Each structure stands twice: as C-alpha cells, then as structure tokens.
Amino acid sequence: MQNKIVLAYSGGLDTSVAIKWLKDTYHADIVCVCVDLGAAKNLEGIQKKALTLGAIASEVVDAKAAFAQDFLLPALFANALYEGRYPLATALSRPLIAQELAKVAQQHDAFAVAHGCTGKGNDQVRFELTLMALAPHVKVIAPAREWGFTREEEIAYAGKHGIPIPVTVNSPYSLDVNLWGRSAECGSLENIGLMPPPDVYDWTTSPEQAPDAPAIVKIAFDKGVPVALNGNNMALLDIISELNRLGGLHGIGRIDHVENRLVGIKSHEIYEAPAAVVLLEAHKDLEMLVHPKDVTHFKTAIDKKFAEMTYNGQWFHPLMGALQAFQARLQEPVTGTITVKLFKGHVSVVARESANSLYNFSLATYDKGDQFNHQAAVGFIQLFGLPQKTLALLHEKQLAAAQS
Ligand code: ARG
C-alpha cells in the first residue's frame, strides 16, 4: 500500500505542525525534504528536527549549484524583473523545490506531496503547476489551506503535541530567503501608508549609513554568464554571494513593491536583492551594447513574458522553454566587462568594454575623425517623414476645399 507523503520542510512552525497533522489526517508516513538554496541556516538542525517530530525520513538537498545554473542564469539572460521591479527570487525557487519533491516522491513511491503554502499566495500555484507538469499522478496536499487553524489555534495545536514553537513566530514578517534575494511581507508592511520599519531589512545597510566612498566593481561576462569580479575568475555562486555582501554593504537592492499577485490581489513586499540588482543592471547594459536595436527592442517584450511566466509558476510550460532558447541564443555576443559603481543605495554602470561592442567611435563622435555621412541624413529624413508630409498636404487641401 502506498502510504507515504513527501513534505517540503523548512523547520518553521507551519511545516512542523504539518508533520503531525498529515500523519494523523492521512494515516501516512511523512518524508521531509529541505532544499538548500543558499540561505537556510542550520540545515542539520532542521533535518534532525523533522525526525524528532515524527518523520520517517528527512532529506536535505543541496540545490545551490542547480539553482544558480538552471534558474538564476536564465533569469539573468532574460533581464527578469516582474513588473519592472522584482527580481523573482521566491518565484524562481519554487519550481526547483517542487522538482526535488517530485524526485523524492518517486524514490519513496509516495502517493502525495505536501507544501506549507496558504490559499492566498502565489507559491501554492508555483508548486502545484510544477508538480502537475512533472508528476501528474501525484496528489498535492496543502495542510495550511485545509486545516483552517487561526494563528492562535495553530500555536495551541503545536503546544498540545510538543511541537517546539520557533522564535521566528514572533517575527512580524513572513520571510522567504535564497541566494537571489530576501522577500518580506505581512506585519506593518500591510499598511501601505506607513514607511517600512528599519527592522524589515537584513541584508542591506540603509543608504544613509552606507560608506561615503563608492565601490567600483568590474564584472566580466562570457556569453552572458558572469565569470569574474575585478579580474578574478569566480564560480557563479561565489559571484552572487560576493555581490550580495558588497552590494548590501552599499545599501543596494532594496525594493519596495506593491505587486499584482496571480490570485488577483495586490500585496506589499519588501525585497532585498543586492546581487540580482547589480548583475541585472550590468547584464542588460552589456546586451544593449552588443545587440542591434531591433534585437534589444524585440527581446524586451520576450523578457517581460519570461518574468510574468516565472512569477505565475509556469516554469515547465513549453512556451517557457522556447523563450529561454531565444534568450540563450542571444547571449552569443554578450561577452565583455561592465564597470559598476555602488554608492549609497544606487548601482550605476560607469564604463563598458566589449570586443562585440556595436558602439562605433567614428560614427558617434562629434569631434575630429567623424565618419558619419551627414548628407545621407537629408534623403533619409525625406523618406522617413514622407507619410506625415503626405497626410499634412492632404489635410491642407481638405481644409481649403471646406472653406471655399
Ligand atoms: N510576493 C513574492 C512572490 O510572490 C514573494 C513571496 C514570498 N513569501 C514571503 N513570505 N515573503 O514571489
């Protein structure tokens, strides 16, 4: 008989309560899985805690490298910002976590997979769409959507069953953290008329308190992939960690977003994403330098679609694969070095170099050496403006006829 449920376990209150609740409600054995995406602390403790709370197995999956390579890199190639602001840290992590859950479910021949999402957010959609695409026969259970506990009832349930209540229960915010960023919602953030309290930030110095001297960083890209910082070759994971540290120090990457959720509501989120903001800025700038105008303009529309589909949990949709193939193909010339300045909450591109640069000094200069054909502009303007001129002449004629 199949009687196992694989639970996405974080060590927090909801998923800890879920172990006991699932066991009792479904008379099943619980296998916990914690996916390491570069932010969780004390994974060993989390792993042990699941066993203490009655799971029959507890696995920690180190998915950092896969996250960087298969999720963050495509997002960078897509210059991905949902609604022009949110670098999608949480959204990018869900399909990977769900993919790992599906694998473990198969290994354990589990009949169901469970996650701790509520019925109001985007994450339930992302988990479940991924599972529908990768493991269509596996049942999905969302305890927090089913049990109907208030916060107090949940804490009481935990107390009654000896489930430790983590100190983070007292945190006023709901947090989600990984390599690509930190997302905070709830608490006083729900009142959008109030400024976010300083304690909502954890990764970034406030711009006011950031160092008075800027940091200048040279970021080298090879076919769209960040490969070195200030001339030192580094693995993508290390580049991201270092830019999170340095960018955070300079107050970079604070994002205050009232966003449109997939489930129809607007919600207020505070993001911190120093590395994402810096890398996206640099990558986009280099793309603009090496791509012809038509490519840049057309790709912008494709990139927007990528961000929306990622936000909406459609990572394993066939259209997503096609968008990614398009974006990957266009990384071919994206090789070069972008110099950024990090200063008091702002990242700005201050210098660019690329063997594939389409910036041509002799065409651009207003000084000696100008090779632009100024005379060609005359004929160009005549033809470019011809439709407008034709219309204006017609209007003139019609006006004259009406007045006579
Ligand atoms: N609103 C963001 C998203 O839908 C982040 C949600 C993360 N969860 C949290 N507890 N802050 O991707």
Image: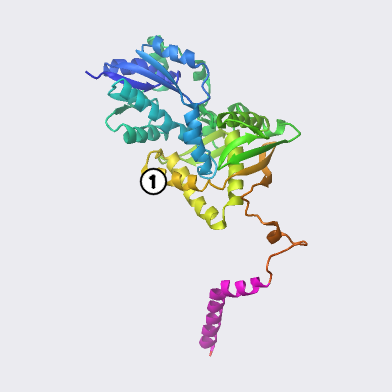
Q: Is residue 293 magenta?
A: no
The residue lying furthest to the bottom in this view is 404
| Position of residue 229 measured from the top left corner of the image (x, y, whole percent) | 65, 34
Q: Is residue 399 magenta?
A: yes
Q: Residue at x 48, y 13 (%)?
A: 45
In the rendered view, would you say 398 is above or below 117? below
Q: Is residue 262 left or right of residue 188?
A: left
The residue lying furthest to the left in this view is 1
Q: Main secondary structure of the magenta part?
A: helix
Q: Look at the image and tell me whether residue 275 can be seen.
A: yes
- Screen quadrant of the N terminus: top left
Q: Which image quadrant is residue 85 in?
A: top right
* Stretch in magenta: 375-403
In the rendered view, would you say 359 is above or below 352? below
* Closer to the camera in the image, 389 or 373: 373
Q: Amino acid at mark 1?
A: Leu
| Position of residue 390 measured from the top left corner of the image (x, y, whole percent) | 54, 78
* Closer to the camera in the image, 159 or 75: 75
For label 1, being within 8 Å of ligand 1 is answered: no
In the rendered view, would you say 334 is above or below 122? below
| Position of residue 261 measured from the top left corner of the image (x, y, whole percent) | 44, 39
Q: Is residue 48 left or right of residue 286?
A: left
Q: Look at the image and tell me whether residue 343 can be seen.
A: no
Q: Which image quadrant is residue 114 in?
A: top left
| Position of residue 251 measured from the top left corner of the image (x, y, whole percent) | 66, 33
In the rendered view, would you say 381 is above or below 56? below
Q: Is residue 350 left or right of residue 94?
A: right
* Closer to the camera in the image, 14 or 295: 295
Q: Which image quadrant is residue 196 in?
A: top right
SS at badge 1: helix
> Residue under circle 1?
319
* Closer to the camera in the image, 245 or 337: 337
